[in-house]
Image (cartoon, rainbow, N blue to C red):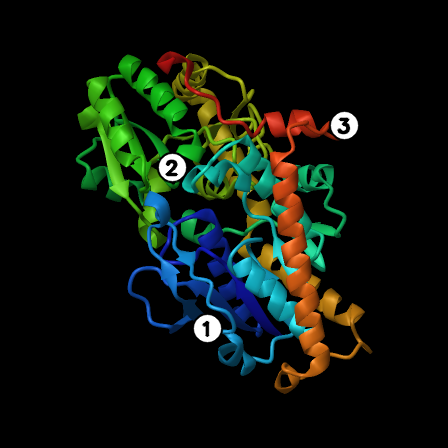
Amino acid sequence: MNILMFTNTYRPHVGGVARSVSAFAQDLVHQGHSVIVVAPHYQQENDVQEEKGARVIRVPAIQNFNGSDFSVRLPIPFALSERIDFLNPEVIHSHHPFLLGDTAMRVARQRELPLVFTHHTMYEWYTHYVPFDSKGMKRFVINLSTQYANMCSVVIAPSQSIARLLQGRGVLTDIQIIPTGIDRKLFASGRAEHIRKEFGLDTNTTIIGHVGRLAPEKNLDFLAWSVSTVMQNMPDAVFLLVGDGPIRENIKTHFARQGLAERLLLTGKRSGQDLADAYAAMDVFAFASKTETQGLVLAEAMAASTPVVALDASGTREVVADGKNGRLLPSETREQDFAQALKELLSNRTALDQIKANAFDTSLAFSRQSSAQKLSTLYHSLLSSRRGQKIHDPEDILSWDVLLRSVKTEWELITQKTQAMVDAVTPEKKKLPSGQRELEEDQRPRSPSSSQ
């Protein structure tokens, strides 16, 4: 099968979406499919690359958009048409509703191909990266992503929580739940001693860890306050922070003000065996984000037999079972209570061994092989349902019929954006469907009470 994927973030960018797309592309190639990934330029990559069998086509992009570590594709019409014709795609898979998501929609409509859309992200919590951030802007991106989903053949939700949320927002397209898989063998092979040797830590040092982008939407102010509170009462504890991002210096400043600068271990971005070693070295994984669509790093930590303390939110509750493989605390938990949960878990050495074993067992449900097979089966079912329908040859892309479909697609894209903008500036708040208000309340980042 020939699969064409469109994504606004891809390696070497470090983030959940980039890792998800890369993993699925590699695993689908391993199954015998042909995969091309269309992604923005990021730093100095070549226009066309090979990544473990998956072909990557880079398109012009603005680097470090608005101070973030994202690349934003420049809108150059028709720049990809000839470059992707040679693949003769059978399925189009969009990983975003914006930017290259628009391109994916056009390509699918022009060729009469099924369009799969994975709703990776809670887009409303990323509007601080664009000008004019407001409640209206958040409503705009919610409405736009919902309308985009309703123009697709099928929508993939990474977790049950997100599937329920999308249905509550009015997504009528069929929703399938397929989480991103993890390389359990890799993360189970971590060498804790390598990290302890690198930072000069003895075996009695307690390591509280976290992996992820250092960005405002990850609720890291809350996490920094919580972890530093634990460390004030545990003189042998350090905080191993893996990742990078725009608020790295803010975190350093906080720990310096608490007199803990020497016990904050910033590793920067890590991947592969180095990342597995970091997970293995952690005695507990601390996680406070409320904006995840799935708990990818949580499953990776558990594959390393590392228990998790996290806040109850979408994506997280599907991985963490309170009292079994870690602690799942109410979303409104205060920093001092989160800190207390960390301390109690680390102090109960008798229960900790069983919790670690349970954490490893939990990771079984998130294997890459299982997730890739589910995605492949979904692709095949879409193609089977379209048998007998006419599919245009790529050489006919400029035919009148295809041109009419292109105009229709452009009109629908304009219409959905216009409607989303109108809804965004409408002052009256629409009543949320039953159950949606509670679910969306879970996603709202909360300012740390101790900093108020």
Q: Position of residue 146 (x, y in %)?
A: 66, 46
Snapshot quadrant of residue 361? top right
Residue 122 in view in this figure: no
Q: Residue at x 55, y 31 (%)?
A: 135
Q: Earlier in the sequence, mark 2 or mark 1?
A: 1
Tell me the element at label 1. Answer: strand
For the residues marked 2 and 1, what is the alpha-carbon distance in whole angstroms?
30 Å
Instruction: For label 1, count other residues whose C-alpha is less than 10 Å away and answer few (under 14), some (14-19) or many (20+).
Output: some
Q: Position of residue 334 (x, y in %)?
A: 46, 14
Q: Which residue is under mark 1?
A: 55
For the residues marked 3 and 1, what is the alpha-carbon distance in whole angstroms?
44 Å
Q: Earlier in the sequence, mark 3 or mark 1?
A: 1
Q: Is label 2 or label 1 in front? A: 2
For the residues marked 2 and 3, what is the alpha-carbon distance in whole angstroms?
32 Å
Q: In the rendered image, which quarter contains the C terminus?
A: top left
Amino acid type shown at disc 1: Arg
Q: Which residue is under mark 2?
A: 215
Q: Which mark is residue 31?
A: none
Q: Which residue is under mark 3?
A: 434
Amino acid type shown at disc 3: Ser
Q: Is residue 172 above or below residue 301?
A: below
**Depth order, front residue of 277/122:** 122
Q: Is label 3 or label 1 in front? A: 3
**Depth order, front residue of 96/186:** 96
Q: Position of residue 8 (x, y in %)?
A: 47, 56
